[in-house]
Amino acid sequence: MKKTLLALTALALLASTAQARSWDDIKKSGTIRIATEGAFPPFNVLKGKVLTGFEVDLANQLAAQLGLKVQWVTQPFDNLLIGLNQDRYDFVIASHGITPERQKAVDFSSPHYCTGGAIVTKPGGPTTAAALSGKSVAVQVGTTYLENVRKVPGVGDVKTFPKDTDAQAALMAGRVDAWVGDKFTGLDLVKAQKGKVVQGALLFNERIGMAVKKGNTGLLKELNAALTKSLSDGSYAKLSGQYFGTDVRCR
Ligand code: ARG
């Protein structure tokens, strides 16, 4: 009898650790675990031990609204959705474009901003998709930039980097003809480099969402409700204004 009970308890424990935490579990624990990259300004940036950025502030705001403390986890971009499916954290906010391919692996929230992928180059460099023909382009690995740049007819060498900031650095060092990245990140780079680079055409548009483990509908519902509230009560608009001087919500 005792043995069976023990075996059953062990099984139950195994089963529960193999599952994403449900909304009830998270609520009961009082703390939500959120993962991001921390190398994607101005969305998520880790400086020393301090995480900042639009998405970090937004997620903190949503968690506060849900009455939860936050435990942040940082991971290389390419590992984020894998870790999510290994239950290392409850959700991911790291500027993931909502794509059919990713939707096979995870569930996305309503979009928390809308943006696009744009070309940045040195003055005189390629600024349109057509001009990328035969040119080398730097992009971050595992991103929608890579996917979309590959589709550009005749594009030259596409070089991938673990971090977006490394891809930018390759452009600055003259190792590639162009960098393709987020249009807002690009604007910041142009500003910081004071005339050394220019922003070219937008290659594609995308809707960005938070990712939960597939089937974690309870948590998704709460996140979406908190986002809707932030979008309607002015707190989202205020935050977006601080980072971008404009409202980046999807319309
Ligand atoms: N928006 C692009 C994508 O969906 C890039 C995201 C990169 N995010 C990051 N934290 N580095 O792939």
Image (spheres, rainbow, N blue to C red):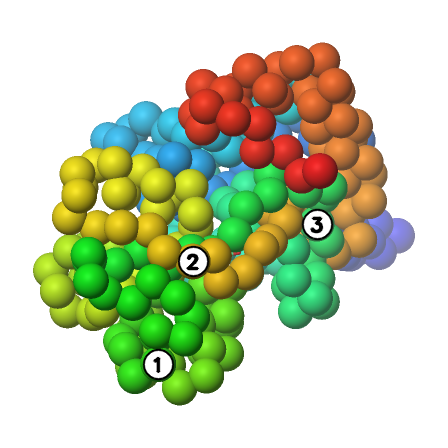
For the residue pair 79 and 236, the one nearer the viewer reads as 236
Q: Are marks 3 and 1 in contact (CB under 8 Å)?
A: no
Report the residue marked by disc 1: 133
Comes first in the chain, label 1 or label 2: 1
Residue 173 image position (x, y, % from top left): 11, 60
For the residue pair 106 and 137, the one nearer the viewer reads as 137
- Residue type at mark 1 is Ser
State whether residue 56 is above or below residue 212: above
- Some atom of ligand 1 lies within 8 Å of the CB belonging to the residue at label 3: no
Say which element carries label 3.
strand
- Residue type at mark 3 is Phe
Residue occupying the point 49% across, 62% down:
203
State whether residue 47 is above or below residue 138: above
Disc on res. 242: none
- Residue reaching furthest to the front: 124
Total marks placed: 3
Report the residue marked by disc 2: 201
The nearer-to-camera label among 2 and 3 is 2
State whether residue 190 is above or below residue 31: below
Mark 1 to mark 2: distance in Å?
14 Å
The nearer-to-camera label among 3 and 1 is 1
- Residue reaching furthest to the left: 173
